[in-house]
Image (spheres, coloured by chain):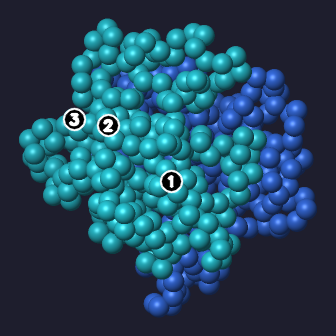
Chain colours: A cyan, B blue
Amino acid sequence: MKVLVVFAHPEERSFNKSLLDSYVKHLESQGNEVKVSDLYKQNFKAVVDRDDFLNLDKDARLQVASASYGAFAAKQLTPDVVDEMDKLVWADTIVFHFPIWWFGMPAILKGWVDRVFACGFAYGTGEYTATRFGDRYGEGIFAGKKAFVVTTCGGSVEQYSDRGINGPIDHVLFTINHGLLFYTGCEVLPAIVIHRTDGRKEEGFKEAVDLVNERFDKFDSVEPINYRKQNFGDYEIPSLRLKEGLELPNESGYDIHIAKK
Amino acid sequence: MKVLVVFAHPEERSFNKSLLDSYVKHLESQGNEVKVSDLYKQNFKAVVDRDDFLNLDKDARLQVASASYGAFAAKQLTPDVVDEMDKLVWADTIVFHFPIWWFGMPAILKGWVDRVFACGFAYGTGEYTATRFGDRYGEGIFAGKKAFVVTTCGGSVEQYSDRGINGPIDHVLFTINHGLLFYTGCEVLPAIVIHRTDGRKEEGFKEAVDLVNERFDKFDSVEPINYRKQNFGDYEIPSLRLKEGLELPNESGYDIHIAKK
């Protein structure tokens, strides 16, 4: 395997960094290649601004999508962004590893997405016709790769369960799993979620390491989340509404975009 | 009204900035007080790190929640964060105004949340007993305030509709409306969402301005989203699972956390 881990935590001695070190070592011991984008260590610039687009006229109005598209096409994105793109293209497996802060990614990782998932690279590609709406949601730059989230959170399993007040964890992560990873063509494996991290002692840490290592050990047998592809008949084009009757009788919201076997 | 707008867009000549200027002018012309946290203009630091906690020992392991709690209690957060807290406390109305990038907030705004919503201020407050699980979800520092999102996006209304491939817009925004604004005690008004922004001409811009101005003109008559409060009997404590039978027969996921009248 060629694994890229995009990692976001500010502390070298954290639960998350120790977990990262453990599974990277495990992967390497089995002959896999691993690259880690340690965003805090890289001091990765988290904020999209005009400095990202080297060919943008200094007096031009910044429209992010079009500036991104123009700079990507002209090879005028900044070297830090290009490096991350190269690692993504190199990998066959992509892991986003971060603590859940306020029900989402730390800003440094969101900024990595905002900058690296450029127009013409991660979106805005492919044909827009009567039967296709671009290469996205099941097609795109990362087609053929697998991806998943490793994350920690303060809340309990129950608080993120089907009836939990935070919402189901798969819904909290939907804009990442479906909106970033599946959107760009990855097959998305279920997230590995470590709950109540701050209270964990040695045993709880070991349990987390085992969970992630087991994921890699049984990698090929893990079923991806069965998100519906956009351009294969399930959606009206261009409204991109799911055709009537495809979902189960009681499904609504995010759940209708996962096909049941 | 005393309105705080937390605004995140990098371009002075953008649709979003022009929209902001228009409704701020409208509000002020009617005698309201308005403060704007223009995060790009302020060059707001987007990334949580140990520099945020002035009393953290330089050799100490950084645990974000506890460092945040300790620095808030000791008045050892950085001045930029304290300024934002003061503005939040001052306001009776809070607006988060941003473009949707990759189904979420721009990183600079997520980082503002990560830094300003400190432990002891925005979370980790109140009593944890058999009947209460802290002051959150309907109680908290911002109780008595109203808040809402103003946002722009590339996708159409249909693509963000009940059957749309992006998921319903109210689900995409749930971790903001419910997870940030309601969590900290605000009454949350429905988001104002401007679709297909890049294609809009003068008329489409004016339509957006009218939408926001109308929101303020009819402010007191706008019904808040009826999220269920955490500590008032609807949830088991401490699992925070919604008690059985409270939702409508076909509801699941995020929707069960909104009580129907």
For the residue labelled by badge 1, is the local secondary structure a helix, a strand or a loop?
A: helix
Q: Which residue is mark 3?
A: A120
Q: Is residue B155 visible?
A: yes
Of residue A192 and residue B141, the one placed in the foreground of this image is: A192
Q: CA distance from mark 1 to mark 3?
A: 32 Å
Circle 3/circle 2 CB separation < 8 Å: no
| Sequence-first tag of 1 and 3 | 3
Residue B94 as seen in the image, left or right of residue A42: right
Q: Nearest the camera: B28 or B117?
A: B117
The residue under label 2 is A144
Q: CA distance from mark 1 to mark 2?
A: 18 Å
Q: Disc 1 residue type?
A: Arg
Q: Quadrant of residue A126?
A: top left
Q: Residues within 10 Å of mark 1 (few under 14, many from 20)?
A: some
Which mark is first along the chain, 2 or 1? 2
Residue pointed to by mark 1: A215
The image quadrant that residue B174 belongs to is top right
- C-alpha separation, residue under disc 3 versus residue under disc 2: 18 Å
Q: Chain of mark 2?
A: A
The x and y percentages for residue B136 are 74, 56
Q: Looking at the image, is mark 3 or mark 2 earlier in the sequence? A: 3
Q: Amino acid at mark 3?
A: Gly
Is there any visible trace of residue B47 in the rendered image?
no
Q: Is residue B205 above or below residue B115?
A: above
- Chain hosting mark 1: A
| Residue A9 in picture, x, y percent from top left | 45, 68
The x, y position of residue B38, in whole percent, is 40, 54
Tell me, yes or no, whether dots 1 and 2 are on the same chain.
yes
Q: Check the image and report above or below for A188 versus B214.
A: below
| Residue for point 8% across, 41% down | A74
